[in-house]
Image: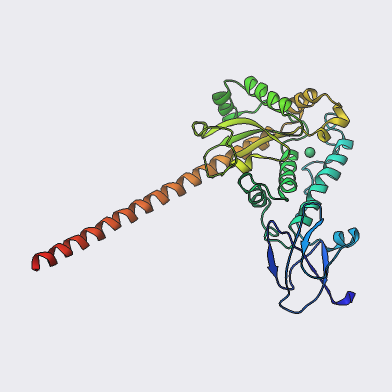
Amino acid sequence: MQSSVSSVSLTSTLVPFQGGIALQCSQFRVPKAGPFLFLMGGLDSDCSVLFIASSFRKCSKKECQTLVTAQLELKPPPYSLNALEPHMSRETFEYHWGKHHRAYVDNLNRQIVGTELDGMGLEDIVVATYNKGDTLPPFNNAAQVWNHDFFWESMKPGGGGKPSGELLELIERDFGSFEEFVKEFKTAAATQFGSGWAWLCYKANVLDVGNAVNPFPSEKDKKLVVLKSPNAVNPLVWDYSALLTIDVWEHSYYLDYQNRRPDYISIFMEKLVSWDAVSSRLEKAKARALEREQEAEQRRREEEEATSGDGEDMEMYVDSETEDSEAE
Ligand SMILES: [Fe+2]
C-alpha cells in the first residue's frame, strides 16, 4: 500500500478543485487511482480538515513535513547574526530570524504547496492572498516573510546617521526636515497598537486596490509618506513602494529592550538604518513609477487612435448610406 501512495494537497479557498496525479501534497496521502484522479477537499490554515471527499487519511506531523515541496526559502540576513550588536543581539536574531521568520517560511510552503500560488513570486503571493482586503489563509505568512526579508535589508552594521543626495532632498521636501521625518516615523512605530510595522514609502500611483482602504489621498502621489500597519499588512497591498521598515512586534525587541519600544525605535534610527538600502529602493521606485507612466501614456494614445479610427469608419458608413439614399 505504501508503495502505491501519491501525495495530494487541497486548499479550498484557493483551488477548490484540482486533478491529476502530479498534484503535490503536504497534508494528505491518498492511494494512486490512475492518471485522472480528481479530488475535492479543503483545509483551514492550521491543517485541519474542513471537508474531503474520498478515503484520505491525514498525514502524521512528520509525514507532512517531509512531503512539503514548495520551495520558498528562508533568506539569511545580509550580515552575520551578531553584526548588529550591541544594538540588536545575536540572541534576538537567533529567535527572530532563526525561529519566527523560519516558521513563516515553513508555514507558507505548507499552505501553498500544490496550489496555484506555488511557483509564484513572493510579492505576487502577498497581493493575491490579500485579495483586496478579503484575505486568504496564506496572506499572514506570505506577508511576514516579505516583511522580514525587507526588514533585515533595512539595517546594516554601522548604520543610522543621516541620508544624503536626492533621498534627503525628498525627505526635506515632503516632511519639512529630516528631524521632522524622524519624529513622524518614530511616532508611527511607537503608536502602532499591538503587533505591526512602520514604513517609509514612495507613493506614486493610485491603482485599483478594491476594498483595501488607501491610507493617503491621490494628491500624495509622487511623494514620500510614513504609515503604520497592523500584524502582517504591508504597503504592497496599497501598491506603494516601501523604502524602509521597522518591525514593532514584541519578538523584535523584547529580549534586548523588554517593554521599552521607544528605546528600540530610537536605536534603530540612530544606529541601524541602512540609508544606502533606502536610497537604492527610492531609485527603483522612481524607475517603476516612470515605467508605469509611460505604459499609461501608451495605452491612452492607443485608445485615442482606436476612437479616432471608429469615427472614420462611422463617417464612411454614413456617407455611403446617404449616397444610397440619394440614389433611391
Ligand atoms: Fe518580526
Left or right for 253, reference 172: right
Quadrant assignment for the N terminus = bottom right
Q: Nearer the viewer, residue 320 or 200?
A: 320
Residue under the image location 82 percent in, 70 percent down: 55
Q: Residue 302: image x %, image y %? A: 38, 53
Q: Quadrant of residue 169?
A: top right
Please state the quadrant of the image where ligand 1 appears: top right
Q: Quadrant of residue 253?
A: top right
**Residue 322 sits above or below residue 208 on the image:** below
Residue under the image location 56 percent in, 32 percent down: 216
**Residue 55 sits above or below residue 297 on the image:** below
Residue under the image location 70 percent in, 61 percent down: 115
Residue extending furthest toward the bottom: 34
Q: Nearer the viewer, residue 62 or 36?
A: 36
Residue extending furthest toward the left: 327
Q: Residue 266: image x %, image y %? A: 75, 24
Number of marks drawn: 0
Quadrant assignment for the C terminus = bottom left
Colour setup of the view: rainbow
**Residue 313 sits above or below residue 251 on the image:** below
Q: Nearer the viewer, residue 134 or 97?
A: 134
Q: Residue 230: image x %, image y %? A: 71, 35
Q: Nearer the viewer, residue 26 or 223?
A: 26
Left or right for 67, reference 283: right
